[in-house]
Amino acid sequence: MARVDLIDPRNSKDEEIQAICEWVTEMEGRVPNHFYMEMNFPEFFKAKLAATKILWQLGELSLSEIQHVGIAVSKANSCSYCTAAFCTILNYGMKTDEDYTKSFLEDGVDIILDGRLKAIINFALKVNKDMQGITDDDVNKLRDFGLSDKGIVQLVNLVSDFASYNRLNLALETDYDYRDIWRQVGFDWKAE
């Protein structure tokens, strides 16, 4: 059970909040529970989601690459909630094959054949785990795959953005409201 009140953002009269709800419903099929928690601080909710939207829409990484990073980082941070959210967007919102999404969730970067995507995910995981261990070679490898400084900054900010959502959902115990398959495959969850 969530540790803070749940406030339905769909009841807000704020047009910005309504637009955020429409955007997430398009990608996930509904408004997720963490939005209900974030409505306890609606001013930040609007600013945070606006920044997330910019990261997703105005950088060099594709939406598919972004979702792969979200899955990898969230799983590394043991956040089944966010992992499921990104799996839902990749599978439902982007019409990516469910078996592929499950394979990536289960086996991670090892199943990735595309060199660019593999480099992006490996860099993201290293930033998440050991940001001070990033080397010039790590950054140059991204450049070799076509990322400019803008794309590199976008990627580091995505890792930070995803990790902050992981912390919010883990610390405040967001009620899980995604398909159980994602936590079964990624976290060996079993129904009680």
Image (cartoon, rainbow, N blue to C red):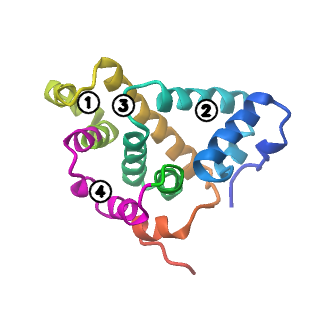
The N terminus appears in which quarter of the rendering? bottom right
The magenta stretch is 96-120
The location of residue 38, given as percent across then percent down, is 68, 41
Query: Residue visible at 42% across and 72% down?
Result: 188
Magenta stretch: dominant secondary structure: helix
Q: Nearer the viewer, residue 91 or 4?
A: 91
Q: Distance between the residues labelled 4 and 3?
A: 18 Å
Q: Mark 4 against mark 1, which lies toward the viewer?
A: 4
Horizontally, residue 170 falls left or right of residue 33, namely left
Check if mark 4's residue and mark 3's residue have beta carbons within 8 Å: no
Q: Which amino acid does label 3 sit on?
A: Leu
Tell which of 62 and 83 is nearer to you: 62
Gap in angstroms between the C-alphas marked 1 and 2 = 27 Å
Residue tagged 3: 155
Calculate the distance from the C-alpha at mark 3 to the C-alpha at mark 1. 15 Å
- Residue at the image position 86 percent from the left and 33 percent from the top: 13
Query: Please, is residue 180 above or below residue 169 in the view?
Result: below
> In what element is the residue under mark 2?
helix
Q: How many labels does the image show?
A: 4
Tell me if I can see residue 6 in this picture. Answer: yes
Q: Say whether disc 2 or disc 3 marks the residue closer to the N-terminus.
A: 2
